[in-house]
Amino acid sequence: MKNYHSFLLENAVNEFTKLPGIGRKTALRLVLHFLRRSHKEVENFGKAIITFRNKINFCKICYNICDNEFCNICTDLSRDNSIICIVENIKEVIAIENTRQYHGLYHVLGGIISPIEGISPNNLQIQSLIERVKNNKVKEIILALSTTMEGDTTNFYIYKKLSSNTNAKISVLARGISIGDEIEYTDEITLGKSILNRIDFNKNIENKHL
């Protein structure tokens, strides 16, 4: 125990430090915050987390999170189902939706190819993407992954897989996003313009080899 004089406090702090970006000082501050709240408020907080973990689903079409079998985006008849935007995870869906510049559908990979972290194409929703494109009238596929080495590697892998299975246009976000940036941390205006000004993936490859 680290001078907390309470095993219960130490245990609670340890659990909070398991969250990303939470050090021991922040964890202690959060735990003490809950200590000041009423029993009912803390109970409601705990129930919300447990209910979320136990009942949340992944959309059977795009793998976004949802409360039912299919997400609200995939079932929205006003969306353009001929365009699919490929993203790494749910945070990118939220970021792009906040721009209000995109009105197509999504496909959530669940990560990006990263040999260092042991993530291969088989660990991602790439095969389901290929099948989805094959079985639907898709006119455009937007590669909206982070502009990191891993993101670019995943973009190229998907491009090679899809180019032999579809005649759909394959585009990538315009480079208003700086190299090395992650989509979720890009401001909404820049991200929105990058979506609107997206470019053909073939041209993107050519530019990299100039």
Image (spheres, helix red, strand yellow):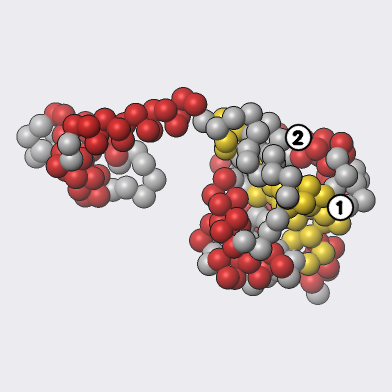
Q: Quadrant of residue 208?
A: bottom right
| Residue furthest left as drawn | 5
Q: Is residue 130 left or right of residue 115?
A: right
Residue located farthest toward the bottom when viewing the structure as drawn: 210
Query: How far across and down, in percent of the image, does residue 186 sit?
Result: 54, 64
Nearer to us in this view, 183 or 74 = 74
Which kind of residue does numbered mark 1 sit on? Lys
Q: Residue furthest top?
A: 54
Dot 1 corresponds to which residue? 139
Three-letter residue code for mark 2: Ser
Circle on res. 128: 2
Q: Earlier in the sequence, mark 1 or mark 2?
A: 2
Mark 1 packing: few (<14 Cα in 10 Å), some, or many (20+)?
Answer: some
Viewer-side residue, 196 vs 153: 196
Asked whether the viewer can see residue 159, the reply is no
Q: Residues within 10 Å of mark 2 (few under 14, many from 20)?
A: some
Q: Residue at x 44, y 32 (%)?
A: 52
SS at circle 1: loop
Image quadrant where residue 151 sits: bottom right
Which of the pair 53/201 is nearer the observer? 53
Left or right: where 126 falls relative to 112: right
**Quadrant, the C terminus:** bottom right
